[in-house]
Amino acid sequence: GNSVTQMEGPVTLSEEAFLTINCTYTATGYPSLFWYVQYPGEGLQLLLKATKADDKGSNKGFEATYRKETTSFHLEKGSVQVSDSAVYFCALPDSNYQLIWGAGTKLIIKP
Amino acid sequence: DTEVTQTPKHLVMGMTNKKSLKCEQHMGHRAMYWYKQKAKKPPELMFVYSYEKLSINESVPSRFSPECPNSSLLNLHLHALQPEDSALYLCASSQLPGQGAGGELFFGEGSRLTVL
């Protein structure tokens, strides 16, 4: 079945640093891929998604490209802010169209 | 209105109590979900309602009882819980069932449950 592997955290960076959070997947076919974010004390919210190979999802300065050659969907941001501190989850659907979640990566940005 | 509202935000209950968690959305979504999230872990799917009918029950113990009174409301009735059931309970909705196929899940802020 489908699965997703996400780099473990926490990831600690200084403000304005470059961010990469790795996500790789195994899947039958080419499912949509998602990044969700959970800010402290809140529920999850969709950050970005890509629905087909070579698609680039982007939102709030974050980007991720659907790469079928490397089965990856890494999350990147050129200059992080303290307000980006959160937990980030990579996800893709299973055969029942329910989301399979990565383990989550906690991001800590220091001023 | 793109909100999913959950009440209460915090709940403390004893193992013999009966309580309910409530969830409401007014986005016209036809699928609603209950997830359980332990600290520092991804959410675990518990139940899915599609068009107000229970379509998925992920082998959840019967001390958790979901209810979908109408297309906007979702309840989770709790009875005889155990301390290990303490967690954040998240409600979510999506426009259509099969959200993983390309749709978006909208989450509430969750109800933090502590079982003493």
Image: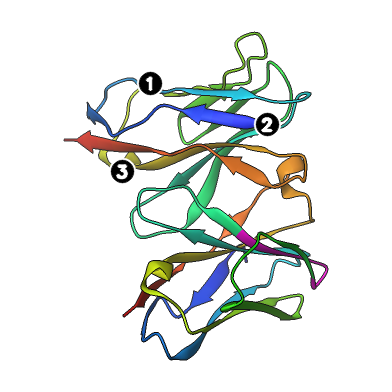
Give the vertical position of A35 relative to A76 (above or below).
below
Q: CA distance from mark 3 to mark 2?
A: 32 Å
Percent of width and height locating residue A93: 69, 39
Q: Residues within 10 Å of mark 2 (few under 14, many from 20)?
A: some
Residue B15 colored magenta? no
Q: The N terminus of chain B is located in which quarter?
A: bottom right
Q: CA distance from mark 2 to mark 1?
A: 30 Å
Mark 2 — on which chain does it sit? Answer: A
Mark 1 — on which chain does it sit? Answer: A
Determine the residue located farthest toward the left in the rendered image. Answer: A111
Give the vertical position of A29 relative to B42 (above or below).
above
Residue B49 colored magenta? yes
Q: CA distance from mark 1 to mark 3?
A: 14 Å
Give the vertical position of A87 relative to A17 (above or below).
below
Label 3 vs 2, first from the N-terminus: 2
Q: Amino acid at mark 3?
A: Ser
Residue at the spot of label 1? A78
Label 2 vs 1, first from the N-terminus: 2
Q: Amino acid at mark 2?
A: Asn
Q: Quadrant of residue A95?
A: top right
Left or right: A33, with A13 as reference point: right
Left or right: B47, with A30 as reference point: left
Residue at the spot of label 2? A2
Residue at the spot of label 3? A83
Do marks 2 and 1 share a chain? yes
Q: Which residues are magenta?
A: B46-53
Percent of width and height locating residue A15: 23, 29
Left or right: B49, with B8 as reference point: right
Do marks 3 and 2 share a chain? yes
